[in-house]
Image (cartoon, rainbow, N blue to C red):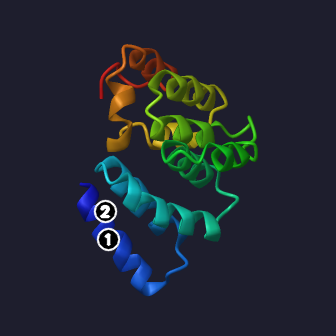
Amino acid sequence: MYELAVVEARKALELDDRIYVAHWVIALSYFFQGKRVDAQEPAEEAFRLAPWSVAIVGTLAGLLARAGEKDRAEKLLATISAAEPVGMYMYHLVCSEIDATIDCYALGIEQRNLRAMVIASAGFLKPLRASPRWPKLARMMNFPGTM
């Protein structure tokens, strides 16, 4: 329901264009619809508003890497602490590096990072749930093997 997500995020931005999560939702929605070029501008705006959000940093770094801006992507990645794996799993997810995404996601689960459990059923994590490694992650969160 990425198109609906964009519509709803735009409604939020009509109320306040500083809602960084709305910009990020638009970026992710465009990206997962295959509109990679369109995703970069809202990702940049989300980052401008919330440079402290590791999820946004990871998303933007992934978009930049895919666009060939490796140097800037690496500089952004250097700002992500290993203690916050969400940034790295967003980066790897955007880069379509599923095994690396799973490795970082598993670290988040081990650290009892609530975000990992909260987004487990998100549409954009479908590639993870399709992986033969998913049942182990699901068990780590006390979920059934399939969702």
| Closer to the camera in the image, 139 or 23 | 23
Q: Secondary structure at mark 1?
A: helix
Where residue 125 appears, as percent x and y from the top left, is 38, 37
Around disc 2, counting alpha carbons within 10 Å, would you say few (fewer than 14), some (14 to 19), or many (20 or more)? some
Around disc 1, counting alpha carbons within 10 Å, would you say few (fewer than 14), some (14 to 19), or many (20 or more)? some
Residue 101 vertical position relative to residue 124 in the rendered view, above or below: above
Residue 71 vertical position relative to residue 83 in the rendered view, above or below: below
Q: Secondary structure at mark 2?
A: helix
Seen as rendered, the residue at the extreme front is: 68
| Labels 2 & 1 near each other (Cβ < 8 A) | yes
Amino acid, disc 2: Ala
Residue 131 vertical position relative to residue 12 in the rendered view, above or below: above
- The answer to whether residue 101 is seen in the rendering is yes
Seen as rendered, the residue at the extreme bottom is: 15
| Circle number at residue 5 | 2
In three-dimensional space, the C-alpha distance between marks 2 and 1, rounded to whole angstroms, equals 5 Å
Tell me the quarter of the picture where residue 98 sits: top left
Image quarter hosting the N terminus:
bottom left
| Residue name at image x 53 percent, y 34 percent | 92
Amino acid, disc 1: Glu
| Residue name at image x 50 percent, y 25 percent | 102
| Residue name at image x 46 percent, y 15 percent | 136
| Residue name at image x 28 percent, y 50 percent | 33
- The answer to whether residue 122 is seen in the rendering is no
Where residue 3 appears, as percent x and y from the top left, is 24, 61
Image quarter hosting the C terminus:
top left
What residue would you read off at disc 1? Answer: 8
Tell me the quarter of the picture where residue 18 sits: bottom right
| Closer to the camera in the image, 108 or 2 | 2
Where residue 25 appears, as percent x and y from the top left, is 42, 60
Where residue 32 appears, as percent x and y from the top left, is 33, 47
